[in-house]
Amino acid sequence: MWYMTEEREMLVKMLREFAEKEIRPAVPEMEKGAYPRELLKKLGQLGLLGLVVGEEYGGSGEDWISYGLMLEEFAKVSSTFALLTDLSSDITIGLIHKYCTPEQVEMFVKPALRGDILLSFYSTEPCGIFNVSEYETRAVLDGDEWVINGGKIFSTNSDVADVNIIACVTADKVDPVTQEGISWFAIPASDPGYSVGHIENKLGWKGSHTGQVYLNDCRVPRNYQIGPLNKGVPLLTANLVPGYCAYGAFALGSMEAVFAKTKGYLQGRIQGGKSLWDTHQVIRNDMANMWILIENFRGAVFSALENRNRGENIFNQAIGLKVEGEKLMEHVASQCIELHGGVGTVYETGIERFYRDAKMLSVGCGSNKTLVDLLSYFI
């Protein structure tokens, strides 16, 4: 591949070994709802949670292609774990580290990079993730403390994170055009006013804990405000949307895995002394068409990541990868289930899991319907 170097080959080898030895044995328990806290801590110890964070912040200072390779390899084994890796690194650490004061870097960023603490980021409310002008969670300054009241829904890591980065209204009114009026705050899970409600029983991403969060008179020091006051949404959009490339990497890795698993099954399934692969041209054609889709999508994913390395604006590309990645992954997983016959629908075979996880890509970090609508303003 054009993007591979000797250094990246070594990284992939290490990532693949970690995925097979550490992640794969944990998949059955994750599918039952177990959260892989210890595995994420190991990633921190290996320096992988800070793969694209600058060395001045305590990170490894690698590039976005290397980050994409990591998520691709992890998603071959578990889309859930790839998601949680992204959440524990780019969606939290990556989102805040450049806006943190030196004191905040020491309190939140470096411990999270090491895996010593787990971060989360919550924005979504019943009104929606991007409808910020109707947010009700509010932070009010009281002397040297911020008092926070409200709640969030679909909050991943809600019952396991140590520190929660939460978007709150800090102006009299959020400007619906500029979207100014929202600020970020770090709220420790140990705060007496922080509580967790129902944890959702989701279709896929079973090992991720997503639920409701309640904030009742949470009080945090003034210096727990992260980033400039009232500028939280523009900063979120500028950093979160390019991060949708990660969803492309999830989809790519999962498609590769279910494709390889299906090819192996077809070549090993013997009927009348010959394999299904050898006796059915239509099966090979189906697989060839899927291969084309996967390889073309691979080019799109790593081209976008290279553009991000170069500092280019990949806002539109990243949305496209999230939207198209879900469609392709759902299609490939569905086709592979059919090619397995009844076996593909059996939970223990691990095929149907890819199909369930595919649908999660369409709603995670913003509905694809909403994102396509947003994209329509910029094309």
Image: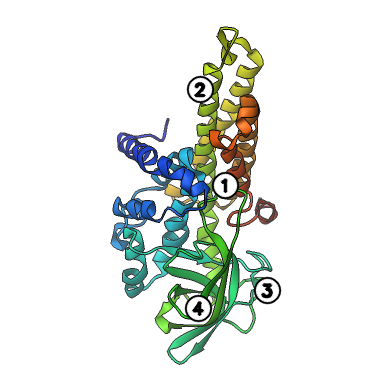
Marks 4 and 3, how far apart at CA: 18 Å
Marks 4 and 2, how far apart at CA: 55 Å
Of 96 and 346, nearer the camera is 346
Counting residues from the start of the chain, the first of labels 4 and 2 encountered is 4
Of 56 and 333, nearer the camera is 333
Mark 1 vs mark 2: in front? 2
* Pointer 1 residue: 317
Mark 4 vs mark 2: in front? 2
Residue 357 found in image quarter? top right
Marks 3 and 2, how far apart at CA: 51 Å
Q: Are marks 1 and 2 in contact (CB under 8 Å)?
A: no
* Pointer 2 residue: 264
Marks 4 and 1, how far apart at CA: 29 Å
Give the structural element (helix, strand or loop) at label 2: helix
Q: Say above or below: 176 vs 342.
A: below
* Pointer 3 residue: 134
Counting residues from the start of the chain, the first of labels 1 and 2 encountered is 2
Q: Callout 3 environment at 10 Å: few (<14), some (14 to 19), or many (20+)?
A: some
Of 36 and 125, nearer the camera is 36
Residue type, mark 2 in image: Gly
Q: Residue 45 appears at what percent x and percent y?
A: 29, 54
Give the structural element (helix, strand or loop) at label 1: helix
Residue appearing at x 46%, y 55% in the figure: 35
Counting residues from the start of the chain, the first of labels 1 and 3 encountered is 3
Residue type, mark 3 in image: Glu
